[in-house]
Amino acid sequence: MILDNRGLEPPQPMIRTLAALENLAGGEVLTIINDRRPMFLYEQLEDLGYKQRTEPQNDGSFKIEIFR
Amino acid sequence: MVPNTIGSETNIKLPFSFIIFSLIALVLSQILLLINGQMLVDGSFRIPAIWSAAHLLVLGWALMVAMGAMYQLVPVASLTKIWNEKFGFVQFFITAIGIMFFSWMLYVSPQNASIPGILMLFGILMFLFQMFMTLRKQAKPNILTAFVGSALVCLLLTIFLGIALIYSLQTGFAAQFYQAIFKSHLLMGLTGWFTLLIFGFSYKMAPMFSLSHGFPMIHARYVYGIYMSGLVITLISFFSDNSYLLKAGFFLLFAGFSIFTWHVSIIINKRLKKKLDHSFSYALGAIGLGNLIHLAAFIALWTDHFSILIGPLVYLYLLLWIVLSIMGYLFKIVPFLWWTYKYSKEMGKKAVPALKDVMNEKVVVPFFSVFVIAVLAVFLSIIFKNILFFNIGQFILSIVFVAIALTILGVLKK
């Protein structure tokens, strides 16, 4: 599943991401695209037991893959 | 390519330069107070060492933190890039050198402080210009822009009122307005610049740290409208010397602040995160304390003791509302910034420390509790003119300040 969070005001990207994670099937990867590095999301992911991989994109945004 | 400088992200080194400088200034200001404790015992408050320490605290620490935080948060909140990052670094160096030099001059040779003061002023004006150019680019101004923009206008007014004070002292210019200018300087600096800025940023940070959404934002307009009219009416009352206007102004400030408190409580009640972090809880507690102090100031106006009470109340307002808010948020923001700077690129590639291991949250409750108690002790000691109590309170306060600053700086070793 891919979630494009660009152009949204914080904390909307975080809320959307956490909501999407609730509906994520086991083994599935959630990919989000954010304007900035989601510093505060990392803490939440850690608490929820998720891992992530962040990659800067050429347009200045960040792609984050979230998985168990 | 440095990934930190593209998109709407600010290069983390910029806010960090401000924050690290501010913590060093905080430690220095407290060391100055501790060394000169004896003079305070003798009851001489208006001595160069105290001027120096006070300016290091308010300008070197609080103003520099606020600037650093704005470099980080304004792009996040307004979805625009900082106008010119290089200009930001130049601004940092000029302001930092200006403040250090200015505080040092106040200490060794106050009559010559206006020379480095000009350098400092230039740095702050550069900052205002930077923010003006950044906010101008914002596609869709919102209520936050109003808060932050008005805060910046108040900062500018504070500076000009401060210059007017020095000029008036030196030349006797507008001497009959000296008291009014002095009061306005405090009003614009504390209730204008700092309070409006914390209001504005709290609307971003409270939902972010509590994971709140779906709350109404309409209250913010009333907060802004009522608090701003309170500022304007109070300002007019200072120059017209009208006690009814002063009461009306203080009431509006209290009313605006109360709506803000109520609004934040609505936001917090809509949160997803069950347990709030300690440091953030203290920042929220500071809102309640600020509200109480506004109420106390309004009530004091109706008594005969206003002239005795207002000084200590201003002290309380600065420490328990402004400083406590900034401290609470700093404890939260610094580990995030540092951790992101150091580890976010390595995450997923190798094992990195968990975010919660970066900052020792356990120290928050004891540090902040002692801080609040020490401030109250100093407040009471000033009212009751108890010098021993004052010294014990101020000594403990300085130690806590230094401990907090070192704890935050300690994050950078992780």
Image (cartoon, rainbow, N blue to C red):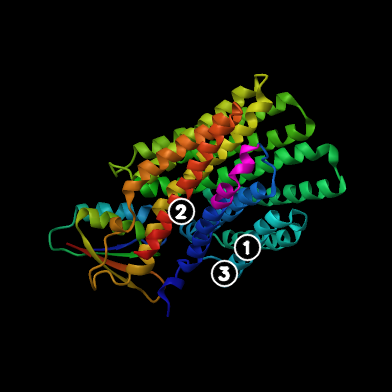
Q: Does the magenta-highlighted stretch encompass residue B33?
A: yes
At mark 3, the secondary structure is helix
Residue at x 38%, y 50% (from the top left corner): B208
Query: Label 1 lies in what chain?
Result: B
Within 10 Å of disc 1 (Cα), the crowding (few <14, some 14-19, many 20+) is many
Work out whether residue A31 or residue B132 is closer to the camera in this orientation and state it.
B132
Q: Position of residue B280 (x, y in %)?
A: 39, 45
Foreground disc of the pair 1, 2: 2
Residue at 16% from the left image edge and 63% from the top image edge = A28
- Looking at the rendered structure, the kind of residue marked 2 is Ala
Q: Which of B246 and B159 is in front in this view?
A: B159
Circles 2 and 3 on the same subunit: yes
Q: Is residue A65 visible?
A: yes
- Membership of B188 in magenta stretch: no
Q: Residue B95 carries which label?
A: 1
**Residue under numbered circle 3:** B89
Residue B253 visible here:
no
Marks 1/2: CA distance? 20 Å
Q: Are marks 3 and 1 on the same chain?
A: yes
Instruction: Return the x and y of residue B56 as percentages of the image width and height.
Output: 60, 53
**Which mark identifies residue B405?**
2
